[in-house]
Amino acid sequence: MTHFHKLGVAAALAMVVSALPDAVFAATPAEKAAMPGMAGMAKKVRTELASSAAFDADGRLLAVAKQGEHLMLYRSDDQGASWSAPVIVNAQPEAISGDGENRPKIVFAQDGGVLVSWTKPLGKPNTGEARLARSDNGGASFAPPITVHRDRQEITHRFEAITVGGDGRVYIAWIDKRDLESAKAAQKPYRGAAIYAAVSEDGGRSFKPEVKVADHSCECCRITATVDTDGAPLFLWRHVFEPNERDHALAKLKTDGTPASFQRATFDSWKIDGCPHHGPSLAVASDGTRHAVWFNQKDGDGRVFYGRLTANGVDGQRFVGGEKAAHADLVVAERRVAIAWKEFNGETTQLHAEVSEDGGVSFKPRVLAATGGASDQARAIKRGNDLFVFWRTEREGMRVFELR
Amino acid sequence: MRHFCLLLLLVLAGMKAAAAEPFLVLDRQAARSLVEVKLHSAPTIIALWSSDCSHCKSNLKLFARMATTNPRLRLITIAVEPFSEELAAPLDHLGVPGARYAYGAESPDALAHALDPKWRGELPRTLLFDGNGGKEAVSGVMDEHGVNRYLRITAKP
């Protein structure tokens, strides 16, 4: 082929390629209108803000957040006004789930050990292992993390939740798809996923073999964990009640992790074959009142609700915030109850709170902050009877708001 | 030479049809334009999905089949999470055609609001345009009958 011919082929090729987008894949007017706003082809922009914070027995605030393939522990001696240089939780880098309903958690063992848990995603989509690392020196350094379950299939063991019982046992529960996978292999139907739990009797250094708490949980909403007045662990999660009602279930666990009780906790009857991506929160007052916040669609509208969970249903159920309220969290200290959530107002994401001084009978609303960028879910935390909201935002970083 | 060019055209057209669409970054302006009902002159499905959503796969599979067998039907997918390279695999695996979008660096809350102010984050979420001024939003897994019903809502008044 001569030089001329080469040029001719190149020109023909260029004409063909330039003609293709319109000739082969004509853009709709909506797509064309969308084009001017494009920055072009996507580049990796993922920012994972998911984090947790808790006050230790000495009143220091510890926060755990993801940085690449490490979890970092930050300490504040001034309620979040300033933070220490971080400590690496996992010395060996590994994948860590840190967005949406996933987040690392931090709790304290009875002997003062600092426990950080997270989900480590595996190779296949939606798979993972529940991981835990323990510090014996107040968070100055951590032992290598362990996987808390014996099952090592490359399947879902994700969205772990952790709490420390009154007797010092560490309870961790997660969404587990081993029963779903078995059912699939046997070509049998199986609703949702399952909840499994593992118990540690040595402060989180090791865990006994996991046990099943319940079949038919929802697949990707965060679980909430707390402790009842008798010291037994309580777990609340979004369940899939027959045929496809994604209401919440509450289980109280025995010391071996099996359920002592299991009950339907909410009754909004949201029927959806889908993923709400919106988990609940639960806290128990010293008088035994179980305060909860959750999200459900009821009568066609998706709303955040507050209510007190009882053996006979929900007491005092009401809306929290406006139509765009989302991802509420809740904390209780004696008669004080605080709810925190975020709410997009059309321009910015606002951080809202409500505080009750009378055990949840009446609440006073407050707007704490706003951000124009991405933000994590709000975390309601306490130090004794002092209540706070921890909020990490892309632009402003980690902030703490005291609810006086 | 003529034959060579014709062959090239056919080969390239085939490559283009088979190649996955590159992801585009969704910003607020693009989101508002994509859901502008006046700009949809043909039946269009905008499928919101995420890598975490196991139920989204059955919708994407259905929509891919419908869009492949019905040349009038447009399919646009939007991953409602920040772009990462891993987002292409599930769409490629299911053979999902059409423009692919993923969230950019803007606030996810603002992008979600621009796409669908009534949407509360549940997935799958599907926006259906009948191409004749009709628009519906549906949460959850859909079947073909449901998609057709929504797409024809105002197509034949």
Image: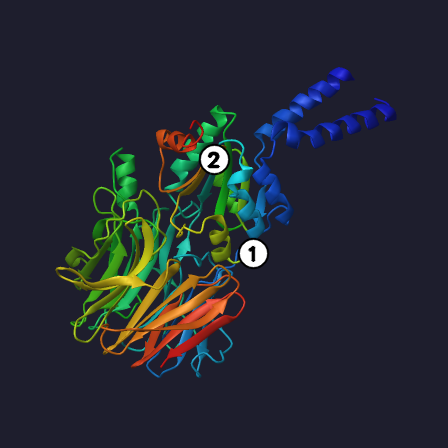
Give the amino acid at mark 1.
Ala
Extreme residue toward the front, this view: B157
The chain identifier of the residue carrying mark 2 reads B
The answer to whether dots 1 and 2 both sit on one chain is: yes
* Among the 4 quarters of the image, the one containing residue A11: top right
- Few, some or many C-alpha atoms within 10 Å of disc 1 (few <14, some 14-19, many ≥20)? many
Q: x, y percentage for residue A213?
A: 21, 54
The colour scheme used here is: rainbow
The dot on residue B93 is 2
Camera-side residue: B105 or B89?
A: B105
Disc 1 or disc 2, which is closer to the eye?
1
**Closer-to-camera residue (A394/B106):** B106
Q: Residues within 10 Å of mark 2 (few under 14, many from 20)?
A: few
Residue A328 % position (x, y): 35, 64
Q: Nearer the viewer, residue B92 or A109?
A: B92
Q: Which residue is mark 1?
A: B105
With respect to residue A262, does A189 lie above or below? Answer: above
Q: Earlier in the sequence, mark 1 or mark 2?
A: 2
Tell me the SS state at disc 1: loop
Identified by mark 2, the residue type is: His
Residue that appears at 30% across and 44% down? A272
